[in-house]
Amino acid sequence: MRKIHLLLGLLFLTALPPASASLRVFACEPDWAALARELGGEDVEVYSAITAYQDVHKMQARPSLIAKYRQADLAVCTGAELEIAWLGALAEKANNPKLLPGRPGYFEASRFVRMLEIPASVDRSLGDLHPYGNPHVQTSPHNILPVARALAERMAALDPGRAAAYHDRLGQFERRWTAALEKWDARARPLKGVRVVSHHKTWVYLYDWLGIDEVARLEPKPGIPPSGAHLQEVLETIRRTPARLVVYSAYEDARASEWLAERARIPVVQLPLSVGGAPGADDLFGLYEVTLDRLLQAAGA
Amino acid sequence: MHSKTLFALGLCLACSTFPVAAQVGGGTLAARGTAFNPKISLILLGTYADFSSELEPEIPGALLGPETELRPGGFSLAETELVIESNVDDTYHGWATVALENEGGETVAAVEEAYFNTLALPAGLAVKAGRFLSELGYQNRIHAHAWEFVDRPLVYRALLANNLKDDGVQLRWVAPTDLFVELGAEALRGQAFPGGGEKRDGVNGAVGFVHLGGDVGVGGSWRLGLSHLQADADGRETGEEGAPEVFAFTGDSALSVVDFVYKWAQDGNPAKRNLVLHAEYFHRDEDGTVDFDDGAGGTASSGYDGTQDGFYVQGIYQFVPRWRTGLRYDRLKADNTLDTPDPVFDTLADDDAATRWSAMVDFSNSEFSRLRAQYNRDESRPGGEADDQFFVQYIMSLGSHPAHQF
């Protein structure tokens, strides 16, 4: 009789997920992976689909990603069609109903951020525009807190046994982040009004935060690589409206930026864009430290 | 008439999505995250082709299936594909591909694919039902607009009549492991070549497949596939529909495929430079009888037992953003036995190897457009006479963003 009880007990235990199993997080970008680690600590197991050296627009639903997506409890992505080329294909192949849009396991950071550059109309002749606005929301540290609050809520809902731990870590993160924001805002003052040229339409949230003025872009249209003729036009533009810097991100080809910087005799600055995109940008705090360091140094401010 | 109705249907569906787009323009929160919702795209595909040989494009040792002829010489429109896909509800997703093509001067609409698949089954399972491209091999499920060359590999043209698409059910399971492991099975009507014929009831075709995959460092990723097709043919006809000369095959056809794909890019970032290697090996075994009818009273019949082995290897290299170049080698060889030899079966009994070299370069202004030039040194006809083939092709995608399948 006791044996049967033991057996039944064992069966019951194996049917339930073990209490120590961590929440498996599939992050589309390294920034959301970093945020999930801040909020989840040792209670989560985090995988990032891309690195800061990869172009998020160009990724494919490759087998290793399907295998990770299949096992995840929570997908944390930017949304706003940033991952449109591969996330749908990944979901279709991975057979994981927990991560279906609309279910708690599917989290889109852009829903908690005030979107900028929402186009009035979308036509492919204007390039690969995102109809829901510019999706590169992680470029401003002011966008991180609203996402963090929503994400901690979501993690607590999915893993109610450890809800208190998620809320605690959110509290700590909020205090550290608010202090860091004050420091960054003060440091960033000299960048206000600085005119720059950028490679892709990546930095709208960064520029909005810092008061930087983008006078031209190296891509003639979003997603279309810089051509010689267009670079000449940009050179003409900045002869009329001088710019102080050329900005590109870790995954972009440096050659177009360097070509322009050399002719216009202005410095070129590579920004990490995402966590892991430069030495020192190992977490979200480091990401904005390095971004500010590099901009301030290049602008001589 | 038929095609007009379909176009109208497509337009109506397109209209119904516009209010959503308008809302989005206004920036309403509710409209966000709708990337998984109705997608409509229209693919425009056309070629200019030139061939140095005017011989019938037969292949030694193979009875070719329907629609396996070469592209017409000169300018020609290939299929115009209308694709509509959407989540049906929280449980199902639906997909339809309607191809408008020119057949003997008339435009016909063909339902290339029309299926639904499940979204919410537990335990890594998914079911697909309807008409779909089989998971046999690697390239089989890839649509014409995503091919790396103007034409299909020889093994696909000769052994599958371009690709295996049939009506049926597919069950697929993905293992909960970091190594990608996918198993699947398909039960099919058996209408598609190399099956086909009149008596179609029950399951006359079946496919099983195993896929493994993973990464090599940051820059590399791979997939290995093993798959098998078992099909019954009952008077499966060969060649163009309505042609006076008919070969009909009755018997069993079994096809095994090993496929391998490796993709590489510096830092895993394909935007600048990237390399894609494909190789597939096909082995087909057929056993049955072949009946010949020349349409004017002349007939012949023979028992036929044969195997055909073939493969292709290809490499595609993107050397600067937007520009790619590719090289492909094709080979196919048969070992067929006909127990009642007859001159009409000479091509089928021919055990010469068919080979082809292809080289291409293409330019993609954006993800939505591609222009391609290709040269083939084709020695795939009986007798092995070389055919120098030139192609120029355009592929234009209107509408929703193409998915980046591996």
Image (tube, coloured by chain):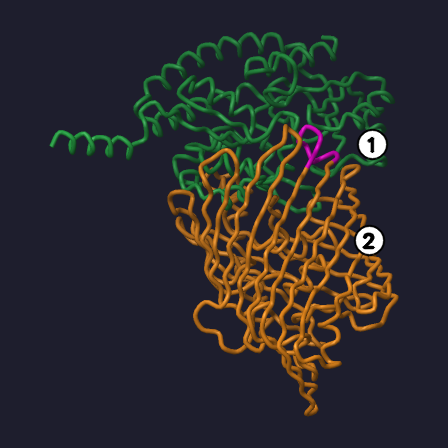
Chain colours: A green, B orange
Q: Position of residue B309 (x, y in %)?
A: 68, 59
Residue lying furthest front: B339
- Whether residue B1 is visible: no
Above-or-below relation of A122 to A8? below
Can you tell which quarter of the image residue A187 is in? top right
In the foreground, B390 or B285: B285
Report crowding for label 1: few under 14, some 14 to 19, many 20 or more residues within 10 A (C-alpha): many
Above-or-below relation of A128 to A214? below
The N terminus of chain B appears in which quarter of the rendering? Answer: bottom right
- Whether residue B40 is visible: yes
Can you tell which of label 2 and label 1 is closer to the viewer? 2
Q: Residue at x 65, y 14 (%)?
A: A279
- The reply to whether the magenta stretch includes residue B272 is yes
Q: Which residue is mark 2?
A: B373
In the foreground, A163 or B385: B385
Q: Which residue is mark 1?
A: A231
Q: Position of residue A214 (x, y in %)?
A: 71, 25
* Span shown in magenta: B264-273
Discs 2, 1 touching: Cβ within 8 Å: no
- The reply to whether the magenta stretch includes residue B210 is no
In the foreground, A232 or A274: A274
A42 on left or right of A224: left
Chain of the residue under label 1? A
Residue lying furthest bottom: B297
Residue lying furthest left: A1
Tell me the CA gap for discs 2 and 1.
28 Å
Above-or-below relation of B46 to B107? above
Chain of the residue under label 2? B
Report crowding for label 2: few under 14, some 14 to 19, many 20 or more residues within 10 A (C-alpha): many
Q: Position of residue A299 (x, y in %)?
A: 74, 12
